[in-house]
Amino acid sequence: MREEYGAVSVLVGPHRGAYPYGNSLLVRGAAESLVVDPSLSLVDDPPPADAVLVSHAHEDHIAGLSGYDAPVHVHKGDLGALRSRKAMIAGLGLPPTVVPDVDRTLRDQFHVHGRPDAQGFEDGTVFDLGERTVTVVHLPGHTAGHSGFLIEPDGFLFVADIDLTSFGPYYGDPGSSLDAFEASMRRCREIDARWYGTSHQKGVIEGTAEFRRRLDAFEEVVRKRDAALLTLLREPRTVEDIVKHRLVYRPHVEAPHVEPVERRTAARHLDRLTHAGLVTEVEHGVFRTAH
């Protein structure tokens, strides 16, 4: 399905772009066109483009990349992972026992083969398509290189995996950062646009006021995780206890990445709450709400 916003076409993935799919963009200028985040739904029928921009090097955002011989660009922070599937997997921080299965999944389901020809961009890099520009807005936290794209004169801001879903912000990779994710959400809040496009499920939000309202709800998930952890730590708990309780995933979700993501998420919240004086380490590896 294709939705039109000025000269920006949103190529909506199945189930509104829910994982393993995603929403891609086709941006047309007077001289050139480019695709943003070619997803799994573009594998069999990739629209022609003169270049490809990748918001970040996660498999659901590059599954359709094999259909393009055009130049590929990603932020320098994610360049290594885009160039090499091995580097991408290493950056996920998975237990060694599951790496072979994950490697097969990325190769066979997501068609990830690495793009050693990929080029790195920086915050503020401008791609001029002729009477239309695409400007990089670096939004780290989800990954080190996670970026959005401001398309003008249409007034379309693609915010990628600041996706406004009820799942909330994801900062569970080794290269993720809770502080950086929060800073990126603040930066998005400051950008006035006509349309805000997301990678998954929520699609395109029209109007700055509505976008900020939804961003408030998305950001509130972080506060809820803080509150859940403070409640849990009314009694002394280890990180293992917190991992079993789960701050991110529901109890029925089982996958190789769940335990390490929960562990890293717990560590990031513990670090922040400890520095704020709200949690104390009562003995090595044992934490409790401060009184």
Image (cartoon, helix red, strand yellow):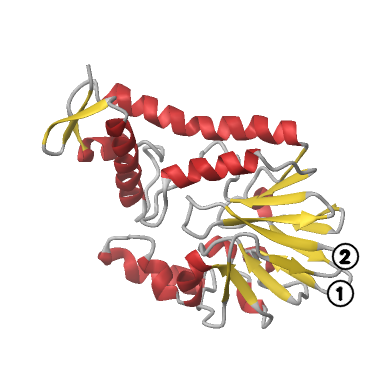
Q: Is residue 179 above or below residue 121?
A: above
Q: Are marks 2 and 1 in contact (CB under 8 Å)?
A: yes
Provide the residue designation for mark 1: 31
Q: Residue furthest left?
A: 283
Helix, strand or loop for disc 2: loop
Q: Nearer the viewer, residue 244 or 204?
A: 204
Q: Residue at x 52, y 42 (%)?
A: 183
Q: Residue at x 34, y 71 (%)?
A: 100
Residue 169 seen in render: no
Q: Residue at x 70, y 46 (%)?
A: 203
Give the x, y percent position of residue 240.
21, 40
Answer with left or right where residue 80 lies relative to residue 37. Answer: left
Q: Residue furthest front?
A: 124
- On the image, which quarter does residue 246 sit in? top left
What amino acid does circle 2 point to? Glu
Q: Nearer the viewer, residue 89 or 220?
A: 220
Q: Nearer the viewer, residue 175 or 234?
A: 175
Give the x, y percent position of residue 199.
63, 52
Answer with left or right where residue 271 lies relative to residue 104. Answer: left
Helix, strand or loop for disc 1: loop
* Image quadrant occupied by the N terminus: bottom right
Provide the residue designation for mark 2: 131
* Image quadrant occupied by the C terminus: top left
In the drawing, what numbered circle is on residue 268?
none
